[in-house]
Amino acid sequence: MAYGVKIAKGDAYKRAAIKRRHIRVRKHVSGTPVRPRLVVTRSNRNIVAQVIDDIAGHTLASASTLDSSIRGGEADKSAKAQQVGALVAERAKAAGIETVVFDRGGNRYAGRIAALADAAREAGLKF
């Protein structure tokens, strides 16, 4: 089944392209109770990471640059993404989750997305 996203101009075109890619990735990536999905949502200013069980429809762990432990720091966006990756891995391990499947949310695996994933791997999360 084909999913269509309207083509727009400028920044809206960029968001539509990201949405198209995310739909394409989600056809193949799904979270289970044994191996939930680590989804990354990125905006210009913030980044959010959630560990989701798609079968039950529940968020098992999450972290964001809006958390009080990360918010207001003087670090750049990539460093904050690393902090979010380490924090979500710590919270996932506390919830008993060892392995996840990574969902980059339609974004390229570079920059802040890669920094978050690498920090989560270093903190002991497997994917």
Image (tube, rainbow, N blue to C red):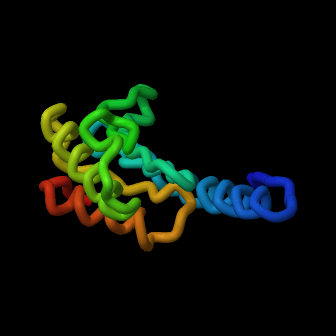
The residue drawn where x is 26% and y is 59% is: 127
The residue drawn where x is 30% and y is 61% is: 79
Quarter of the image where one finds residue 36: top left
**Horizontal arrangement in the rendering, residue 113 relative to residue 26 (left or right):** left
The residue drawn where x is 38% and y is 35% is: 53
User: From this viewpoint, is residue 116 visible?
Assistant: no
**Horizontal and vertical percent position of residue 46:** 47, 48
**Horizontal and vertical percent position of residue 33:** 30, 35
The residue drawn where x is 44% and y is 49% is: 47
**Horizontal and vertical percent position of residue 21:** 63, 62
Q: How many marks?
A: 0
49 or 1, which is in the foreground?
Answer: 49
Relative to 79, is 43 above or below?
Answer: above
**Horizontal arrangement in the rendering, residue 64 relative to residue 106 (left or right):** left
Relative to 106, is 58 above or below?
Answer: above
97 or 69, which is in the foreground?
Answer: 69
Quarter of the image where one finds residue 74: bottom left
**Horizontal arrangement in the rendering, residue 44 relative to residue 64 (left or right):** right
User: From this viewpoint, is residue 1 visible?
Assistant: yes
